[in-house]
Image (spheres, rainbow, N blue to C red):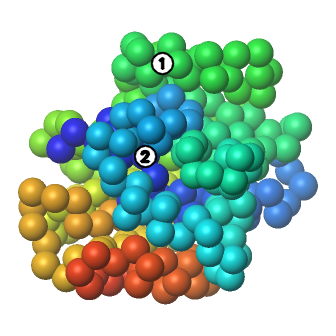
């Protein structure tokens, strides 16, 4: 699967991933202590929906379905507010990627580290945050960066792993990366995103995870029948999930699933064994 961000910006998987991300960041903002946020597969930061995303049109069945909603759970409302802030014209033209959402929720004492390996995307990402002293942008391999950048300073914070899934072993690499990240940064909140095309590879990757503290899985599918040739849904492994966030995520998934559904589907939020 080729999941280069620009072609899939604003699709149903992005909506789920970014609602969860916003809920986690809001929990970190709830305390006075500063935090670090790291996105090791950062993309370009924000996306013009009339560009690459228009070639797939996936955002039509994602953010476009809900962007005008006025009554939603708190995490969804906060997320939609950030999307609307990126579109001052009132038309859905720009989709903010994870780096832009993270930056929007940072306070002056917080720090953001972004990693992108693709040379063109890295150049655009550097341009997006040029002159921003709170943001560091690196061009390096994400899995190598786990060893080089963790633990961050401040030590309190969040790591997002969101690979492109261009390699057949990427789910296994995600499981290994989550374990490595927790070993190097035991107190860090970790969010590892994965696509759901077929169930067995996902279940195998989840089973490969070692016991981890406060480890949960959040998933949403938009089809009842899973066809491996399409993106049927997505999920996130969440480690050190802040206390109380599970209720915010449950409310969000209950609200999102019927609005994003194509032909059925379901949501799932439960702790992982361990």
Task: State the image quarter where residue 37 is shown.
Answer: top right
Q: Is residue 116 visible?
A: yes
Determine the residue positioned at 63% across, 23% down. 128
Ranked by sequence position, the earlier of labels 2 and 1 is 2
Q: Which residue is found at the position 47% from the left and 42% from the top?
A: 49
Which residue appears at 36% of the width and 34% of the height? 52
Q: Residues within 10 Å of mark 1 (few under 14, many from 20)?
A: many
Image quarter in which the N terminus is found: top left
Residue position for label 2 = 9
Q: On the rendered image, what quadrant is the C terminus found in?
A: bottom left
User: In the displayed structure, would residue 174 be above or below residue 263?
Assistant: above
* Residue at horizontal 52 percent and vertical 83 percent from the top: 255
Q: Position of residue 185 (x, y in %)?
A: 56, 44
Image height of 98 relative to 234, above or below: above
Circle on res. 122: 1
Tell me which corner region of the image, top left, top right, bottom left or bottom right, holds residue 99.
top right
Image coords of residue 260 (percent x, y): 40, 74
Q: Position of residue 2 (x, y in %)?
A: 22, 39
Side (left or right) of 70 relative to 190:
right
Task: Answer whether residue 183 is visible to the viewer in this image.
Answer: no
């Amino acid at each position: 699967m080729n999941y280069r961000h620009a072609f899939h910006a604003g699709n149903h998987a992005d909506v789920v991933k970014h609602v969860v991300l916003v809920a986690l960041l809001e929990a970190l903002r709830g305390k006075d202590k500063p935090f670090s946020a790291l996105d090791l597969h950062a993309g370009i930061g924000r996306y013009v929906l009339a560009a690459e995303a228009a070639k797939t049109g996936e955002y039509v069945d994602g953010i476009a379905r809900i962007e005008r909603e006025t009554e939603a759970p708190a995490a969804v409302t906060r997320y939609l507010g950030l999307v609307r802030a990126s579109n001052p014209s009132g038309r859905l033209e720009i989709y903010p990627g994870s780096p832009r959402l993270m930056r929007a929720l940072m306070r002056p004492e917080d720090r953001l580290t972004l990693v992108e390996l693709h040379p063109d995307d890295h150049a655009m990402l550097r341009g997006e945050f040029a002159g921003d002293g709170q943001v560091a942008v690196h061009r390096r391999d994400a899995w190598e960066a786990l060893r080089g950048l963790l633990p961050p300073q401040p030590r309190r914070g969040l790591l997002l792993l969101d690979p492109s899934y261009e390699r057949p072993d990427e789910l296994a690499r995600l499981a290994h990366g989550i374990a490595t990240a927790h070993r190097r940064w035991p107190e860090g909140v970790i969010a590892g995103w994965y696509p759901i095309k077929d169930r067995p590879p996902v279940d195998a990757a989840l089973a490969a995870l070692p016991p981890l503290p406060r480890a949960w899985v959040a998933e949403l599918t938009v089809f009842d029948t899973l066809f491996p040739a399409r993106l049927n849904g997505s999920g996130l492994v969440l480690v050190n999930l802040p206390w109380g966030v599970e209720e915010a995520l449950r409310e969000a998934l209950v609200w999102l699933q019927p609005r994003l559904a194509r032909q059925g589907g379901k949501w799932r939020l439960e702790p992982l064994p361990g």
